[in-house]
Image (cartoon, rainbow, N blue to C red):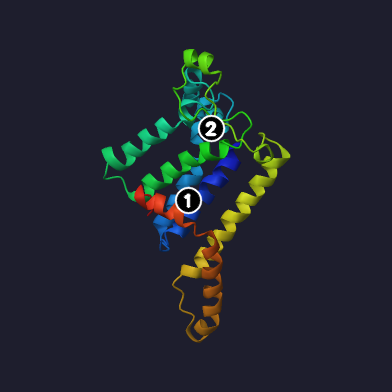
């Protein structure tokens, strides 16, 4: 995936988590979404030609050590990032830690749709193990029609849909939660607020809320 697809998915995932948790409208919620959007491009520091390494030269050193979609896209690094943000440094604001973690994890989540796959369990299998089990360790999407090659028409469509979803959810969230006193027009605004809240209920994925709350992700 290219950088803006990752950025859009990072923002969309953070928004969906906040909606599922019934998070209140706050600057922290907005900051968490913005951080998730920004951090979603970071795992591609393992690619010398990625958008992020082309703009921050020193980050290109990572690509000289690790193969693309291996260490920076692995479960072990996501787990280490979680430990650093939520356990080792408990003073980090929850919104900040959540935005960084969700953005980072969103990257390899959507990369699972890439035909090349992601080495989620890096450093396993090792080279020796790969020869014995005849598998290079890259987890691929088993549903072929759901694979999305990089810079393909499929990615262009996915990118547009993700951006529209992110904008749509943001507008509905504002309409449903904004503490607006319209005086004599307040009665007319209530149906709008109710419609927005009802529509948002369709993206309230409870399993996502339970998982996020268990990991203390939120604002």
For the residue labelled by badge 2, is the local secondary structure a helix, a strand or a loop? helix
Q: Residue at x 59, y 26 (%)?
A: 49
Nearer the camera: disc 1 or disc 2? 1
Query: At which x and y percent is residue 35?
Result: 45, 46
Label 2: how many Cα within 10 Å (few below 14, some 14–19, many 20+): some
For the residue labelled by badge 1, is the local secondary structure a helix, a strand or a loop? helix
Query: At which x and y percent is residue 163?
Result: 61, 51
Q: Is residue 123 left or right of residue 167?
A: left
Q: Is residue 126 left or right of residue 112?
A: left
Which mark is drawn over residue 52?
Answer: 2
Q: Residue at x 45, y 44 (%)?
A: 102
Q: Residue at x 65, y 41 (%)?
A: 146
The residue to which callout 1 is attached is 14
Where is 98 relative to 127, above or below?
A: below
Label 1: how many Cα within 10 Å (few below 14, some 14–19, many 20+): many
Counting residues from the start of the chain, the first of labels 1 and 2 encountered is 1
Q: Nearer the viewer, residue 67 or 49?
A: 67
């Amino acid at each position: 995936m290219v950088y803006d697809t990752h950025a859009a998915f990072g923002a969309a995932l953070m928004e969906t988590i906040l909606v599922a948790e019934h998070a209140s409208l706050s600057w922290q919620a907005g900051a968490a979404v913005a951080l998730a959007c920004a951090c979603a491009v970071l795992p591609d520091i393992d690619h010398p030609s990625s958008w992020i390494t082309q703009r921050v030269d020193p980050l290109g050193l990572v690509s000289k050590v690790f193969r693309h979609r291996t260490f920076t896209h692995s479960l072990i690094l996501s787990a280490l990032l979680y430990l650093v943000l939520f356990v080792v440094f408990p003073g980090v604001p929850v919104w900040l830690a959540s935005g960084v973690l969700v953005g980072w994890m969103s990257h390899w989540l959507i990369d699972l749709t890439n035909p090349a796959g992601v080495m989620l369990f890096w450093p396993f299998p090792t080279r020796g193990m790969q020869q014995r089990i005849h598998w290079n360790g890259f987890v691929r999407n088993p549903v072929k029609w759901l694979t999305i090659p990089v810079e393909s028409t499929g990615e262009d469509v996915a990118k547009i849909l993700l951006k529209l979803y992110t904008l749509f959810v943001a507008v509905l969230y504002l309409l449903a939660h904004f503490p607006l006193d319209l005086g004599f027009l307040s009665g007319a605004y209530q149906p709008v607020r109710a419609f927005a809240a009802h529509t948002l209920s369709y993206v309230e994925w409870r399993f996502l809320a339970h998982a996020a709350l268990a990991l203390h992700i939120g604002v």
